[in-house]
Image (cartoon, rainbow, N blue to C red):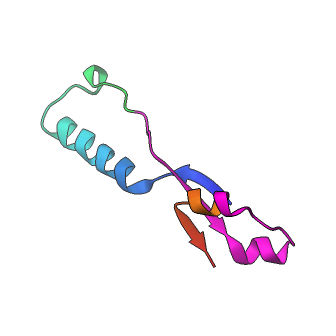
Amino acid sequence: MSYALDPKPALRTMAKQAAEILNGANPGDMPYVQVVHFELAINLKTAKALGLELPATLLARADRVIE
């Protein structure tokens, strides 16, 4: 099971900030941007190998389920 930031919005935000800097913006004047969307990934094959049974509610909340 992994809980990490979703890379697509994070990369999009970084690209926007890089473009602003390349267009002459002062990095010290730019606001701090914090990631707000995280992704939950569950590997069912590994869970079964460890003898774990995951509740259906947890699987329903997962963004990605790897079988």
- Give the residue displayed 52% in from the left and 61% down from the top: 63
Q: Position of residue 53 (x, y in %)?
A: 80, 68
Residue 47 left/right relative to 59:
right
Q: Residue furthest front?
A: 56
Above or below: residue 64 compared with residue 37: below
- Position above or below: 3 against 43: above
Residue at screen point 72% across, 78% down: 45
In the rendered image, residue 67, in percent from the top left (x then y), is placed at 63, 79
- Which of 28 and 58 lies nearest the eye of the viewer? 58
First to last magenta residue range: 34-58
The answer to whether residue 36 is magenta is yes
What residue is shown at x 21% (from left), y 36% (from top)?
21
Q: Quadrant of the N terminus?
A: bottom right
Q: Give residue 31's quadrant in the image.
A: top left
User: Is 1 displayed left or right of 50 in the figure?
Assistant: left
Q: Residue furthest left?
A: 23
Residue 17: x and y in percent read: 26, 39
Q: Furthest residue to the top? A: 29
